[in-house]
Structures are given as C-alpha cells and as structure tokens.
Amino acid sequence: MLEHGGRLQRAAQEYGIALEQWLDLSTGISPFAWPVPSIPAAVWQRLPEDDDGLLEAARAYYQAPQLLPVAGSQAAIQTLPELRHASRVGVIAPGYAEHAQAWQRAGHDVRLASAELLLADLARWDVLVLIHPNNPGGERFRVEDLLRMHAELAARGGWLVVDEAFMDVTPEHSVCAYTEREGLIVLRSVGKFFGLAGARAGFVCAASPLLDALREKLGPWTLSGPARYVLRQALADRHWQITARMRLDTASRLLSALLARHALGPTAGCGLFQWCRRDDAAAVHRALARRGILTRLFDTPPSLRFGLLPDEAAFRRLDAALSEVLQ
C-alpha cells in the first residue's frame, strides 16, 4: 500500500497529541465542505438505482457526454490498466503514485518522467497518464494541447488518461466535454472540491465502449445509495459551487503568501493546495507535526504539500509554528 495524506490517527499516536488538537493540512481536501443534508431512512433501506437523477446532474456539472460513477477515482485508476493489452505507459512524475503502481501491477511497461520529457517523446507511448492540474507538481496543460496529444495517441489505438481530481476550481480548463472521442479518458473526484472525501465517489468520463467495459469489471452498485443521494444535490448546487470557487481561490492565495513570508515560497500549487520543494522537507514536516500540524511529505523530490487553512485561527497557528520551526 502506498502512502497517502490524511493519516491523522497514526500521527496522533506517533506524536502523542490528541486527535482533536491537530491541524490537518495533509490531504488537499477543501476545508469548506458542501453542507450535507439529512438523508431519508428509505435511502439507506433500498438498493441504489441508476435512474435516480445522478447521471443527469453529473453530466451537466462536468459537461461530459457520458460518464460512469465509481467509488472514487481510485477505483478507476486500479481497473483501467486491466482493460488494455501490454502497453508502453508514460506517467507524469512527481504525481499521484497510484497511477504508476496500477499500470505496473497489471504488467505494463511503465516509465515515470516529467511532463516535458513525456511530451517530447509522445510517439513512444501507447498510454499517456497526466494529472491536470498535477498533484503535487501543479503542472497545467492547455486544452488544445491535450486534444492534440490525444489525437496522436488515438491514431494508433492509444489512450490519453487525464486525472482532473483538482480541476473543479478551474472547470474551464477541463477536457471532459471532449470525452466522446475514443481513447480520451478523464477521471474526476468529488472528494476534493466538495469536501466529501468520505463518500468515496468519483466519475469516469469516456466513450461508451470503454465505460461499458469498465462497468462490467466493476460490477453493479459502484456507489452507495446515500452517496448518490448527496452527490445528486451537491452537483446541482450552482450557487454553492460559485461561492466555493471564490473562497478556495482566496484561501489558496493567502496560504501561498503566508508560506512565502517564511521563505517557503511555493514551487507550485492550485486552488486546493500549495507545494514546496525543500531539501530539509522531512525535518520541517516532523517539526510541524510535533506542534500538531500535519503536512504531506514527499521523498522524491523532498517536498511538502500544504492543504488550505480553514479559518483565521488556523492561519495564526501555522504562522506561529513556521516562525518557530524556520527561525
């Protein structure tokens, strides 16, 4: 199992600090979650049904011609490699490590490289896996460039897989609208922007034949009834979404400015996190953890990812801790 952010209970045990005393900045999940309503008892008592309105709400939100609900984009990441014969797969790095592991586990020839190197040798790949914006490196791609890459790959039966887990703050840069094209596969996550990580829900946007094959692999009821009930309303809540984007953009800018004041000027970031490359990242991570502040540590390259601060008290707490740690 790969390491991920959000291991708060483990940190609480390791550092001897009570769970409720932590400031968890390790996940990249919005601290401003969509307000979940009460769930009717009948939703818990019946099997999920496909014609409950969720697909229509998701198509409208993602502007996708067709899509498949899945148990978080992780379910698709693990299953997609099983739908291809042995392929040469280029995966962006540094990035979400589950992508490379899933393709390797399925027996594909996987190479990890920067976006620059991957795109310079596009003819080498049968499958190209990009994260947009990248986590944690923050790389972004123009829509026209992504479509050009896809056209070149698709011409020889290849795939372009685009993980848009952090795209919701800037939906105008998404390529979901073009996923009726064979070989263009977009993964979306509900957990980050809506702050609903516990729902374990996401969507795959792709052409119908691939979605049919993925559905066969995953089986029925990929999402629970309560998750579908909540998501249908969250995806349709346009007013909340507009307000959340503005709030996240402001919080991301404030975090970036705070880090810069402490000589931690972010290397990259997006509307949901800031990423700082630093040789002593592990030492800074431990020092902050001793003060009850959890960040996401990366070994290659040495770096820290900071999630957004939920309020002014958290801002002051991180500010004071960085003053002590980096004095």
Image (tube, grey):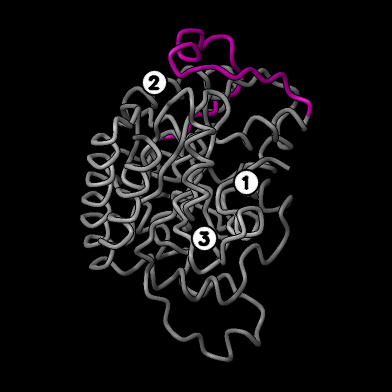
**Residue placed most toward the observer, 61 or 137:** 137
Residue 16 got which mark? Answer: none
**Element type at mark 3:** helix
What amino acid is at disc 3?
A: Ala
Name which of mark 1 and mark 3 comes first in the sequence: 1
Q: Position of residue 291 (x, y in %)?
A: 47, 52
Q: Which residue is mark 1?
A: 76
Q: Are marks 2 and 3 in contact (CB under 8 Å)?
A: no
- Graded by Cα atoms within 10 Å as few (under 14), some (14 to 19) or many (20 or more), the crowding at tag 2 reads few
In the displayed structure, 277 sits above or below 113; it is below
Residue 148 got which mark? Answer: 2
Name which of mark 2 and mark 3 comes first in the sequence: 2
What amino acid is at disc 1?
A: Ala
Q: Quadrant of the C terminus?
A: top left
Q: Which residues are magenta?
A: 107-132
What amino acid is at disc 2?
A: Arg
**Residue placed most toward the observer, 120 or 94:** 94
Marks 1 and 3 sit apart, C-alpha to C-alpha, by 16 Å
Q: Residue at x 35, y 30 (%)?
A: 268
**Residue placed most toward the observer, 137 or 143:** 137
Name which of mark 1 and mark 2 comes first in the sequence: 1
Marks 1 and 2 sit apart, C-alpha to C-alpha, by 24 Å
Q: Which residue is mark 3?
A: 197
In the image, residue 109 lies in the stretch drawn in magenta: yes
The quadrant in which residue 227 appears is: bottom right
- Graded by Cα atoms within 10 Å as few (under 14), some (14 to 19) or many (20 or more), the crowding at tag 3 reads some
Side of 228 where 242 appears, left or right: left
Q: Quadrant of the N terminus?
A: top right
Q: Residue at x 62, y 71 (%)?
A: 224
Residue extending furthest toward the bottom? 41
Q: Residue at x 56, y 27 (%)?
A: 159
Q: Nearer the viewer, mark 1 or mark 3?
A: 3
